[in-house]
Structure formats: structure tokens, C-alpha cells
Image (spheres, helix red, strand yellow):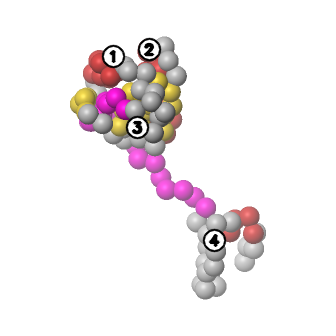
């Protein structure tokens, strides 16, 4: 029986003597093609100290794919931002520009109120 304490980090207590800690995370969903993705583009100011951001939600796919799309959008707008967990954040109010760029790439885009 393997008894490496580092593999049990995060497990508080188990009564099962045959317990095996599953260290593998859940599998990421395969990235859907752009034509099958419904993305929501919105302007947001909540909990951002009054700063306006453009938020893109609804991306279904692998983490590296959403980060690559986020990098491309940030570069096109000439601003910073972040991407991950199915959401892309672009600093500034670029709702119209981002929606147009996503449509050109083949995504289904809906502009939302946030």
C-alpha cells in the first residue's frame, strides 16, 4: 500500500481502509467549433472599482483555447485582460469591436446587458 502523505493533501478523514485519493482532475471538455458556440458579449462595471470591462461568457472548450482566443482579442483591441474558466475579460468598453471580431471568426454572438 502506498502511503505518501503528499498525495493525501486535502483529504480530511476517510473511514475506508482501501481509500485511494484521486489526484487526477476532471477532464476538460473538447473545444466546440466556432459555429456551435454561443458567446455572450457584455459591458460590466460591477466589483471593478468603477472600471469598465468587456466580458465574453459562454466559451466551451479547453483552457489553452480560451486563453488563445483571449490573447487574440486583447491584441486586436490593444488592451489587457484575462481569460479562463469559460470567460474572457477585456479591459475597456469594446463590446461592438469584440462582437464583430468574434462574428468574423464564425462564432454565434449575442450582446447582453450583463
Cα separation, mark 3 vs mark 2, equals 24 Å
Front disc: 3 or 1: 3
The first of marks 4 and 1 along the sequence is 4
- 20 sits left or right of 75 in the view: right
Front disc: 4 or 1: 1
Whether tag 1 and tag 2 are in contact, CB under 8 A, the answer is yes
Is residue 24 placed above or below 36 in the rendered structure?
below
Dot 2 lies on which element?
helix
Residue bounds of the magenta highlight: 23-44
The first of marks 2 and 4 along the sequence is 4
Front position in the image: 110 or 46: 46
Give x and y (percent) for residue 66. 45, 34
Name the residue located 50 percent from the left edge and 18 percent from the top edge. Answer: 79
Mark 2 nearby-residue class (10 Å; few <14, some 14–19, many ≥20) = few
Whether tag 3 and tag 1 are in contact, CB under 8 A, the answer is no
Q: How many marks?
A: 4
Amino acid at each position: 500500500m502506498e502511503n505518501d502523505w503528499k498525495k493525501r493533501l486535502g483529504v480530511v478523514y476517510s473511514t475506508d481502509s482501501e481509500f485511494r485519493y484521486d489526484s487526477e482532475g476532471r477532464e476538460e471538455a473538447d473545444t466546440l467549433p466556432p459555429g456551435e458556440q454561443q458567446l455572450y458579449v457584455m459591458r460590466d462595471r460591477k466589483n471593478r472599482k468603477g472600471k469598465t470591462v468587456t466580458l465574453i461568457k459562454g466559451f466551451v472548450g479547453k483552457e489553452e483555447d480560451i486563453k488563445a482566443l483571449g490573447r487574440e482579442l486583447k491584441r486586436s483591441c490593444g488592451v489587457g485582460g484575462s481569460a479562463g474558466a469559460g470567460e474572457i475579460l477585456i479591459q475597456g468598453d469594446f463590446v461592438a469591436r469584440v462582437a464583430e471580431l468574434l462574428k468574423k471568426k464564425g462564432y454565434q454572438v449575442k450582446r447582453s446587458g450583463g
